[in-house]
Amino acid sequence: MSRYLGQRIGERDAVISGIGRSAVGRKLGRTGLSLTVDAALQAIEDAGLSRDDIDGLSTYPGVATASPGMSPNGVHDVQDALRLKLNWFSGGSETPAQLGAVMNAVAAVSAGLANHVLVFRTVTESSAQTATRRASVVGSGGDRVAGIMQWMVPFHAVSAANWVGVYAQRYMHEFGLTREQLGQIPLNQRRHAGLYEQAIFRDPLTMEDYLGARMISTPLGLYDCDIPCDGSCAVIVSRADASPDLKQVVRVEAIGSALTGRNSWDQRSDLTETAAHDCAAMMWARTDLTVDDVDTAQLYDGFSFLTITWLEALGFFPKGEAGPWLEAGESRIGVGGQVPLNTNGGQLSGGRLHGYGYLYEACAQLRGEAVGRQVEGAEVAVVGAGGGPLGGCMLLTSDR
């Protein structure tokens, strides 16, 4: 028996009953709490619930002061702002990446600790940036550098762009991936952003534009890196049987939260693989569905190469064959292609909502509400978030 089966049906006791999204943009000049409240109230209303129905609250990573704008408010701020009466709450960074907060909520409702959990993720990274400080750079908040970073910062590897760039370089060396092939990811996201009015960058992007942009951390150029923004996403995770009056729901089919390799950016046994490979194996072991059943994939593109690692980890193509697979371009990963990918523009063009934009988009697709970019007949979606030693994924289905 697979090591991952366990209480196989546990996550199937949970549904995503509501989704909400605040305004998203560059330097909105609003507090994180105001954006969170907007998204939260929208999600509660979308589920057909009231604030009195919400008895659980979850977020990732909780308040983060070391990197300004990364996570401006936590569970206590939101509980007080909405005057919620909670039976259960959770917030922290040591989870299966960003989606860990959703997985915690699924576990809570499956265990009967709560009926309806509000899960939120808020960023104000764009407003936090100044001419001399990049909010996403580790240690930019002035805290003492410690932990794994003490071994990276002395070599000026202060950003995830540096760490992911090394992974991408290794993959290129091992398997022959080219920059033109890698460029299919940002070009695809920009095409999809053009179909979505709420995406930040919607102007067309050509391969010439991509290759001509300045290098950020070899082999990653400007358009391989996501866009810091201000915004909030929220979802309601409910017990499937909590209320017969719930509106259209999205069902949780399977979760992948495993970390079987080393929790390290540079000490895994295979430096062409990441934690995405660990959690993807777990997810597929917990469902009878296969990669061939997936109608749309919403996968982390904090940097373009991370999307490739997710696609490979999930089994869309054999190990090392990312380049030839991506050469098909729009016919492969466009809205009407074989694997419609990041149909809202992802984080490369839509804005860095740190994983939760994918979850929101997956739910919109499965509910048939992705106006202008709807994948025809979408019934199964996979969502993956995180990079390097961080990873979590979910398989979602429409309410069939």
Image (tube, rainbow, N blue to C red):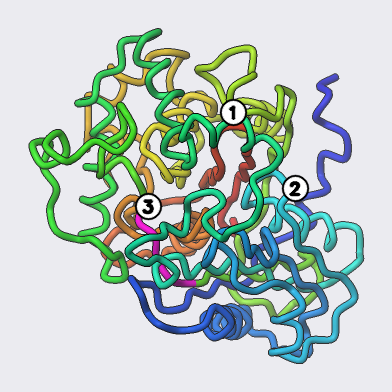
Tell us which disc is closer to us: 3 or 2.
Answer: 2
Q: Earlier in the sequence, mark 3 or mark 1?
A: 1
Q: Badge 3 is on which residue?
A: 346
Q: Nearer the viewer, mark 2 or mark 1?
A: 1
Q: Nearer the viewer, residue 254 or 23?
A: 23
Vertical side of 141 occupied by 163: above or below: above
What amino acid type is highlighted by mark number 1?
Trp
Q: Which residues are magenta?
A: 227-231
**Label 2 belongs to which residue?**
94
Q: Which dot, 3 or 1, sits closer to the camera?
A: 1
Mark toward the start of the polypeptide (3 vs 2):
2
Q: Is residue 234 in view? A: yes
Q: The residue tagged with tag 1: helix, strand or loop?
A: loop
Image disc number at residue 265: 1
Q: Image height check: is 147 above or below 248? A: above
Amino acid at pointer 3: Gly
The N terminus: image quadrant: top right
Q: Would residue 311 be found to the left or right of residue 99 on screen?
A: left
